[in-house]
Image (cartoon, grey):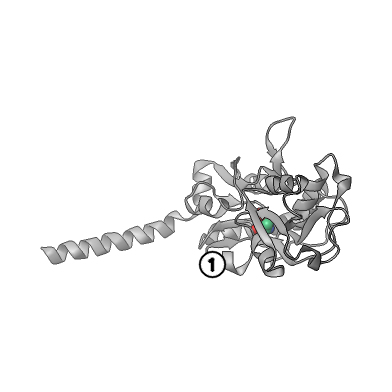
Amino acid sequence: MKKVGVILLVVMFSLDVAGASWAADTLVDVKKKGVLVCGVKDSTKPFGFIDERTRSIVGYDVDFCNAIAKKLGVKLELKPVTSSTRMPDLATGKIDLIAATMTKNEERAKQIDFSYMYFYTEQKFLTRKGTVKTLADLEGKKIGTSKGSTSEQNAKKAIPTATILSFDDYPPAFLALQQGRVAAVTTDESILVGLMNATKDKNNYEIPNIPISKEPYGLGMRKGDTNFVNFVNKALLVMEKSGESDKIYRKWFPGKRLFKITDKQ
Ligand code: GLU
């Protein structure tokens, strides 16, 4: 009797595990529920931020969510995430897709799957004008960034003598710079430009040309969610071919787009 019980347990457990992997077909789930829940930033211009007129979240990342929801034929729901909550929110099913200034790298790819690169930038520093010319000027200084970001890790590696202060988000890190509590804010150049342009005294700040890393962005999906990853990747290639991805870029950034969406990265 006991043996039968154990066998039954093993069978039930295996079914459960198999069930879990069947359940992880977001493509089927999203179509069934009729809504794609996208995790986006809500205070990161121009990727995900609140439009003061409409009070809704808009931006480059939001436009990619919109395009994918449209291709899926479902509604879009946006949920704000931060750099440190986006992966747990995906793992617990709070969101279906991360579109939140997220760099794709090998470390993160152990836990989640990424789409092809849909944005490219580099990590730099935002400083008070004339204070930083080379990396050496930041030795031993306090530098602000956001918790759970690659920016945090890259800065520690690039300037080991600096003290890296990790805030919940980038705007508080920028406030610390404005108040003289840090000598610089570090993250992706595209985000630093957004922070700088949104302030009234932007002429007091600059982004010296000191890149410390490459930051290709990918859309994040649950590990092994192959059908959904394939769908999203195909959607990105179609958007690239039709010119839609370039149109989204031009809507949010000045100048020419220096990257392309391909199946190679
Ligand atoms: N792209 C970097 C990252 O994924 C920095 C921006 C962010 O914190 O989202 O960590």
Three-letter residue code for mark 1: Lys
Q: Is residue 60 visible?
A: no
Q: Is residue 34 visible?
A: yes
Residue 167 percent coordinates (x, y): 63, 50
Residue 4 percent coordinates (x, y): 15, 64
Query: Split into 4 quadrants, where in the image is the C terminus?
Result: bottom right
Residue 108 percent coordinates (x, y): 58, 64
Disc 1 marks which residue?
110
| Left or right position of 138 against 232 | right
Ligand 1 under 8 Å from disc 1 Cβ: no
- Callout 1: helix, strand or loop? loop
Residue 260 percent coordinates (x, y): 78, 62
Q: For ligand 1, which image quadrant applies?
A: bottom right
Q: Is residue 196 above or below residue 231?
A: above
Residue 123 occupies which quadrant of the picture?
Answer: bottom right
Q: Is residue 197 above or below residue 106?
A: above
The residue positioned 75% from the left and 52% from the top of the image is: 191
